[in-house]
Amino acid sequence: MTLSCEAPVVAGMISRQALEEALGGWMQSWRVIAPVRQDGEVRFQPLDEPAAVAWDYANAKHSAKGVYLPQVERLLTYARTRDDLNQVKATDPPAGPTMLFGLRPCDARARLMVDQVMVDGVCRDRYYAARRDGTVVVGLACEHPRSTCFCGAFDSGPYDATGSDILLRSAGDMYLVDVVTERGAELAKDLALEPVDDEHSQRAEQAQAKAEGALRPMERLVGIEAALEGLWDDPLWQEISAKCLACGTCTYLCPTCHCFAVEDRALGDGGERVRAWDSCMYAGFTAHASGHNPRPDQASRWRQRVMHKFSYLPENVDAYGCVGCGRCVVSCPVNLDIRQVLARVWAAARTQAEESAL
Amino acid sequence: MTDAHPHICHCAENAYLPRSMQILRVITETDDHEIKSFDLVPVDDGEPFRFTPGQFCELSIVGEGEAPFGIASAPVEESFVRFSIKRIGRVTTRLHSLTPGTVIGMRGPLGNGFPMDAFAGKNLVVIGGGFAFTTLRSLLVQILQGGDRDQFGQLQVVYGVREPGLFLYREDLAAWQARDDIQVVQTIDVPVDGWHGQVGFVPQAVQELAPSAKNTVAVICGPPVMIRFTLPVLLELGFGREAIYTSLENRMQCGVGKCGRCNVGSKYVCVDGPVFSMAELDELPPEY
Amino acid sequence: MLPDEIRATIGEWLATGEVDLFIGWEPGTVPLTATPAFVRRPDEVDRLIWDATCEHNLARFVRPYRDKTVGIMVKGCDARALIGLMQEGQLKRERLRIVGIGCDGVIDPRRVCERAGVESVEELDGAQLEGDVVVFGDLRIPVAEILFAGCETCNQRDPQVYDLRMGPEHDETSLADRYAHVEAMAALSEDERWERFTSEIAKCNLCYACRNACPFCYCNVCFAEQTNPQWLTPTAHDPDVSFFQIIRTFHLAGRCVACGACTRACPQGVDLRLMLDKLCADVAELYDYVAGEDPEAKPPLTTYRQDDYNDFVL
């Protein structure tokens, strides 16, 4: 899978205070989006002041997806006239560079995967590309994975640098600064770095070992696309989807889900054509005007969700449509746990293999 | 994406921006007025519109939205781009109310089109049912009028509709009936006064025609039930699954493989299709 | 706790084919969470649980199986939903086998998080419900202190319809607090009310979890997803969000049984109860009607009476 990176280079270490000073500088020329505490929860918001960063956050309930793929994005505006039904003007994607600061490795990897579909694959999406090209990521390694995290199942982990330009690793009172990309190297020049000493290096390594050890053991998911091959008609899809409310919360919170609808919206004398998040969980997602629906029930829609994330995306863009962040697990109103679904997939594939061996 | 069907990308600048096209003329194709053809011409002096038969476009009406339609004109018909549209939903109902002179938007060409290179040197059996004759017209006109008729072998067409008033492109059909380099069998479902042509469903008509499968490619577009019953006839005649092509009609929106709506298995109908061979469809789940 | 004799009866129902399917709850994978369970074989009944984490209104799941005989567990509020669905001709009583539960309320994990000083429910790793108390490390929190807000003022804790009954019986005579929050809202000035309303609605991101958790939102094509005519665009902004919330609320007038499933399902913490209880209160006052009490009753918005309240008609 392409979602990996060259080993980052340790550039030095820096105190939180110095980092906050650097942030203050960056905020002059970047729109800095960081995890911030508000109304009792952590959200990715534009930063008002460096001290507002929630350094010790686990992860935000919502992903940072809204930064690189807004929930509602205006593609064009139009005027309504009687004879010209194409008076359209493309909107300019927002100018100005964005820094995603404090992003967890799972979320950083997720953004890379969406890049593959929207920019690096067939046809360059101009709006997405503008946001992507103007964004840098300062990642924050994850010291305390939750019981619902499963990044490890993808051969990744809470200290994966993939998708970050710089990765910060906590070492007690200091942060180690890993440079991952060229843009990261440029950024690192703004930091008042000290050389890393053994003590801090060891602390960081210990924290990493502890974090990786804290991940709940889970069957490895790399290679699950092979398991899915024979399962199209398996009864498991009916069974696992029975309690699904089709509410779409999972797709909204997921940092890799990117399916959208293009809709026209009247505004005064004219209107706008927007791209808005949509969900394969919704019945109307594939419904034809004629009434025909290739995915007429929640079982076929759940099969699509799993196949898309764990079979089609690996085939088409060499990356899974899941990073193990666990948001869907936490927020699903009926606790439809994708980890259990995937365990069922492995089990069903094994049963099939046993039966065909007989 | 298969190598046989590379995505022909015209999305250099902005894949979502429709090009302004003016309605040159509106032709009511069917007696029930439910299907009309719209011939469009570009408003700007921009690049001439180039495409391959089998491709589609998203037609746009601001305030209503967009809908995908197969291109019914052939590339050789340079003076207009034709779309035949059945009135069924919001966008199509609005389209049907429009008159020549009105400007609408068009994004395209999208999709892969028929593999004309693979068709060259072969005989063609073209089978259409009902409303699904649009891109087949594009294919046939291109072969007949594109200047390369001798690049292709025998041309046999079976076109079936419920009743005579539902045939599309009746002028074209009459002209083709008069030619000797194409054989056209038009059939209707049940006998009707005044109809002196063939009667019977498309699968039967294909069976009676009994086209030779040798060095022949079949292209079949129509309602799923028609395809389901015609396919065995073709297989019986000796057509290999890799030599039978169809065009899928999923709900498509962005048209460029991003919005996630039109996939059949790992393939996007808007990018890897809509033209697929039966052999390719065999590899995909039955989700269309 | 699910009493043994109830569990055994459910097993018998499945074994004899008296029910084709039994819908209950089983433990979830997130702390202090249960999840709906669809049980078909007698040997699966050991999966079933009953406790204060069983917050879902399972009536929402029955409709697709209405041609079969379905067993179901329902709390007081959920049972009223079954009655409402029977009133609307969606379910037949004889095709249901109902285990009715006298309920003391379900817990709100967000309140547990507040008490425990954590931000999100998955951080309550190791938290357990032991009888009437949530135990998390050294913390022992009585369930009564962390109930879902609607449960605190609930006056319909006992099931109105059932084949088997479990759980305590309650004295439901006191109505004093039932609409307290609605009255408090009504006492505010118009500007304050508007501010409160708009700030709640602003949290909504139009994910439809509320609608999908509700037993009464069963339209084949919801108005929110109609394309012809199209009423709203699926953005997360006004006016689409307000339009959806207001219309959904009004579509539930005279039908909502105040189970709170919508409010608990909402990932954004929108206080949907506020709007829905306002309509419950209005319907009670204007039409002397409370939803879900009597399967034979006709809902007020589908019946005509000479003395119907119609002051709103201009």
Image: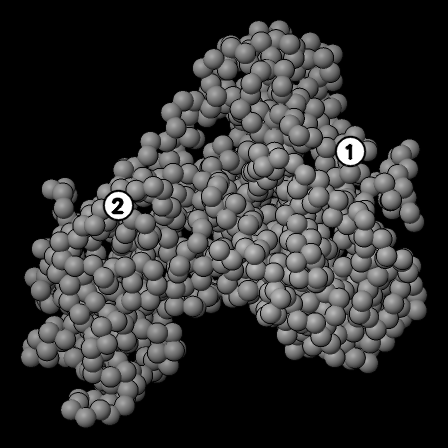
Residue at 14% across, 79% down? B183
- Give the quarter of the image for residue B125: bottom left
Label 1 sits on a secondary structure element that is helix
Q: Is B201 rendered above or below residue B39?
A: below
Q: Is residue A314 above or below residue A17?
A: below
Secondary structure at badge 2 equals loop
The residue under label 1 is: C114
x then y, percent, for residue C228 = 39, 60
Which of labels 2 and 1 is toward the front? 2
Q: Is residue B95 visible?
A: yes
Q: In this image, A40 relative to B204: left or right?
A: right
As shown in the figure, which amino acid type bears the numbered disc 2?
Arg
- In x, y percent, where is residue B174? 10, 78
Q: Residues within 10 Å of mark 2 (few under 14, many from 20)?
A: some
Q: Which residue is mark 2?
A: A80
Q: Are marks 2 and 1 on the same chain?
A: no
Name the chain letter of the residue that bears numbered label 2. A
Amino acid identity at mark 1: Glu
- Chain hosting mark 1: C
Camera-side residue of B55 and A67: A67
Classify residue B225 as left or right of residue A236: left
What x and y, as percent, mark residue A95? 38, 25
Q: Where does residue B154 sit, x and y in percent of width and height?
A: 15, 75
The residue drawn where x is 56% and y is 27% is A45
Q: Residue at x 59, y 15 (%)?
A: A50
Tell me the quarter of the image containing the N terminus of chain C. Answer: bottom right
Q: Is residue A303 above or below residue A151?
A: below
Please indicate, yes or no, whether residue B280 appears anywhere in the rendered image.
Answer: no
Cα separation between marks 2 and 1 = 51 Å
Q: Nearer the viewer, residue A356 or A78?
A: A78
